[in-house]
Amino acid sequence: MKLEKLIENIEKISIHADVDKDITGICYDTRTIRSGELFVAIKGYQTDGHEYINDAVSKGAVCIVCEEVPEISVEYILVKDSRKALALISAEWFGHPAKALSIIGVTGTNGKTSVTNLIKHIIESLSETKVGLIGTNGNFIGDRELPASHTTPESYEIQKLLEKMTLEGCKYVVMEVSSHALYLSRVYGIEFTVGVFTNLTPDHLDFHGTMDEYASAKSMLFPSCNKSVINIDDDYADQMAGKSKGPVITYAVNKSSADIVGKDIKLQADKIEFCILATGSITRAELPIPGMFSVYNTLAAIGATVLLGFDIEDIAPSINSFHGVKGRAEVVPTGYEFTVLIDFAHTPDALRNIISSVRNFAKGRVLTVFGCGGDRDKTKRPLMGLIVTELSDYTIVTSDNPRNENPGSIIDDIIRGLPDTKQFTAIENRRDAICTAIDMLKPDDVLIIAGKGHETYQIHGSEKIHFDDREVVLEHIKQLRIETRKKIVEDLD
């Protein structure tokens, strides 16, 4: 593709290149660059692409898009914002695939994964079309999973995914849109058919600094949405709605003024039942996932699919067949009279939600195993510890993804300031912590293993080590059965 065509829509300060030049590809990471490509120098969270311009040129880059004049002799395009330039150049390179799709973006602190998966399920249940999904648990085209490394990938990868989804027959794409992605312009230039706001609670403050800045980043989605769905039970609803450029549908549990309201809610151990009150209709819904948060997630998905043109009378029955998302209130089958539940909860509000939900149906004690990630917001660690120990009958504080921090220091941050009377212990090794918790369980008890959910690894330094909470549970349960059988044999002898 000609350079002139690639850069025609970006905001340029000056051009110092032959725009008739043929470009063979787009790259923003010198580790993957090939000869003949255009290198876009973006300023990342940890590294600055401008520091790698020399490397890019040595590997064959024929032109640079940058915010700073290169120190070496090379053709370049000077721009005000290279991240936005990358987004628009990538869209041009892949033929603007977003224009052929109805794209639903879901943002908020908690619930994004469940809401996106539920929207996908409803659309596929009510139409004969494959739906693409971009999110934390993976990227999907229909039932086929594609690799994923970020909640919302870099703009180049997003456009590449959208092109692949259009080529494979998708008409809809549902996307988790993180605050990082919005702030770093990863979805810049994409027009969303529908935007959804779930909630906002403290998270990522190591990156955004304050809740106001975090909210401001989240609200960046809505000027790009033709229609929006807003949870008005949340304190930040007005800010999100105020940024929305098109019609807004609201949902709530506590405010009857919402367009879609959840009422007559029945929380059970294995499901929720509630009435959906919408303009001119009352519909009964059932979802086989426990917890009040599941009511909110369902209302959000209903709002989005209504705005896509589906009838609420058809939506409600389709919800019944949704079986949840891996690592979100996921029950691990053990064969014992206790329950082991894995959940991705890694924020104060998410932990409060999942433990409170379990308390609503648990007949016995509630035990929780959790930790906090390294290189992330330290201020939420003692708050998370306080919430978990206050709501649980017993807590084991352990390691999550320590990254470049000392796991013991993270645990110290969590338990510092906790009342001495609280029932908790600290076991740094996550495997030992999970096994210890299982050994403590009695009939009717519920164990929540929080923080990692769908993840199948731990990050120590820059290394990813295989670790799957559910595998640890099942291995230990198998060992318990072996030991039980041995004891039976010994007793018989």
Image: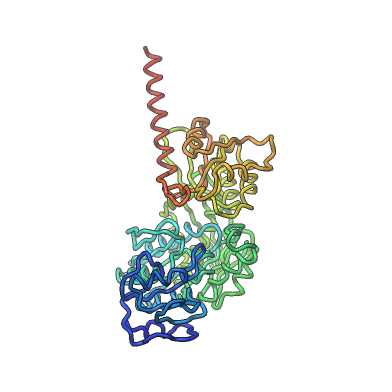
Q: Quadrant of residue 18?
A: bottom left
Looking at the image, residue 42 sits to the left or right of residue 377; the answer is left
- Colour scheme employed for the rendering of this structure: rainbow
Q: Nearer the viewer, residue 199 or 91?
A: 91
- Identify the image quadrant of residue 358: top right
- Comparing 385 with 291, the one in front is 385
Asked if residue 53 can be seen in this view, the reply is yes
Quarter in which the C terminus is drawn: top left
Q: Residue at x 64, y 53 (%)?
A: 379
Give the position of the N terminus as an image quadrant. bottom left
Residue visible at 61% across and 58% down in the picture = 201
Most extreme residue toward the front is 72
Q: Position of residue 475 (x, y in %)?
A: 39, 35
**Is 283 above or below relative to 446?**
below
> Which residue is at the far top?
493
The mark total stands at 0
- Residue 294 in percent (x, y) is at 52, 54
Residue 233 higher or lower than 42, as above or below? above
Say if residue 106 shows up in the picture: no
x, y percent for residue 120: 41, 62
In percent of the image, x 42 and y 56: which residue is there?
137
Using the rendered view, name the quadrant where residue 485 is placed.
Answer: top left
Residue 308 pos. (x, y %): 45, 71
Left or right of 90? Residue 84 is right
Q: Relative to 216, is 455 on the left or the right?
A: left
Q: Nearer the viewer, residue 178 or 283?
A: 178
